[in-house]
Amino acid sequence: MQTTVVNKFLLISIDCWRYDALSRTNPLFNTPKFDLLTQDFSLAEKFFVAAPATRPSHTSYFTGLYPFEHGVYGQTYLKMFEGIPNLFQIFDDAGYHITGRSERPEVFRFLDFEKFITPLDPSAHAQHLGSLEDVIQNLTQPSETPQFCFLHFWYTHGGYGMSGIPGAPSLKTLVDRGSTDEALRFYYAAVTHILEFKLVELLKQLRLSEWAVFIFGDHGEGICEEIIAHGDTLNQNVLHVPLLAHIPGVMNLKFPNPPISAIDLFPTIVNLAGINADYHGYGQNLLVPSESEIDENRLVLSELDSLYGIGFLSRSNLEMPHHRVTSRTTVDNTEISRYAEGVRLWSLTNGEHLYREDEQTGEFVYRHVLCGEDLPCEDPEHFRNAYDDILMNSNYQHLQAQESTAEETEILEGRLRDLGYVE
C-alpha cells in the first residue's frame, strides 16, 4: 500500500476502553455524533495491548517494544531501560510541534517521555472538569507546521464519574450479585462521555484530510467474574481493545487479518512520517500488504508483572524527586516493597483464542476472545515454545542486563537452561 508522507499525527488514548464500548461492536452503544465524524475511520477487529496497565501499555505504544524489552514490566516499575527511542523524542528531534496532554499526566512520572506530557487543561484543578480550548488552540497551528499530538483521557478509569453521587453502587457488588449488565451501564456512560462530547468537539475542529488519527484503548476493563478492573490478570476484556485509524490519502484502510498489537503503531507512524527510527522490534507496519509482510500464524504477546504491586499514583511516588529513583525497582538504592499477591503472567493470542500462563506456576487457561468461554488446550507446548522464541529472538534482549532484579535474572536463566543455552 503506497501512501504519501504525513506530517500531522494525533494519537488519542482512552483509558480502560474495551472492545465492546463502541457502536460498531455493540449495537446498544449510542454515540451518533462520534459515529458520524468517524464513519470513514477503519476499525481493527483483532487489536491487543501489550500490558493491562497504563504505564507499561503506553510505553509499548511509544517505543514499539514489548514490556520485557522496554523494562516497564508492570505499573509500579519506575523507569524504562536506558537508550530506547520514543515517539515524542523522535518527532521532537525531527522538528515537529509536540503536544502531549493527559487528564492524569502524573501517571507517566519517571518515564522517558514524561517531560512531553502536561495536563489537558493547565488552568484546571480537576482535569475532568477542564476546558478543551487550550489543547484545540495547540492543534490548530498553521497548516504547514508538522505536528505530533498525544491526548490521554482518564475519565473512563475506575469510578467512571460516580464519585460524589449519593448511593453510587460498587461495581464489584453488582457483578458479584449477577448484575453485570447494570455495572456495564455505568462504565459505558463514562466512555460515551468521552466519545460523544470530548472527542467530537476535538475532531470537528480538525481538517482531517491533513491528519493521521489513531484512537485506541491503553487497556480494557474486566467487569466480569474473573476480574473487575484491569491490573490483576490477563483477561480478554482487558487486552482486546478498539483501534480506530484514519490515514490521509488512504481510502477504506483494511487491517491485516492476523492479530495486531499496540507495538505495531510505532513502525506504522514513523514510516508514515518518512522517519528512519532504526527500529528492530516485533512491531509491523500496518500500511503494507498483509499477505506478504505479516505472518498469517502470528501470535501477539501481552505481559503482566505485579510483583511490586499494581498501584502507582501514591503521594510517595508522585512527589519523589527524580534523582532518588536509582533503578527501575529501587529508590535510594533500596528495593521498593514487594506485593505479596504479585504474579508474572504472559499470554499469546491469534486474535480469536487467547492462551495465558503463570510464569511462576505453569498454570494456564485457553479461551475464546469474544465470548470468554474456557476451552481445552491440546498443546500448551506450542504456546510455550512461541513465547520462548519471542524472548530469545528479541533484538533488545541485551537491555535486560542493565537493571534486572535477582528474580528477573533467575527467570531468564531458567528459560535459557530449558532451551539448552546454559547448563
Image (cartoon, rainbow, N blue to C red):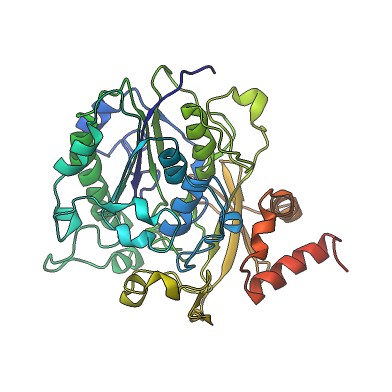
Residue 198 pos. (x, y %): 20, 41
Q: Nearer the viewer, residue 413 or 224?
A: 413
At x 48%, y 44%, the residue is 370
Residue found at x 65% / y 66%? 359
| Mark count | 0
* Residue 185 percent coordinates (x, y): 25, 52
Residue at 68% from the left image edge and 67% from the top image edge: 362
Name the image quarter holding residue 64. Answer: top right
Which quarter of the picture shows residue 20?
top left
Q: Residue at x 14, y 56 (%)?
A: 124
Would residue 271 appear left or right of 282 to someone viewing this image? left
Residue closer to the observer: 64 or 417: 64
- Residue found at the far left of this picture: 166
Most foreground residue, 290 or 283:
283
Q: Residue 320: horizontal and vertical position, in percent?
A: 36, 74
Q: Position of residue 397 (x, y in %)?
A: 69, 55
- Residue 311 seen in this snapshot: no
Q: Is the N terminus in the top left, top right, bottom left or bottom right quadrant?
A: top right
Q: Is residue 185 above or below residue 199?
A: below
The quadrant where residue 29 appears: top left
Instruction: Report the quarter where the C terminus lies.
Output: bottom right
Residue 97 sits above or below residue 414 on the image: above
Above or below — where is 21 with respect to 105?
above
Viewer can see residue 292: yes
Horizontal side, residue 369 vs residue 164: left or right: right
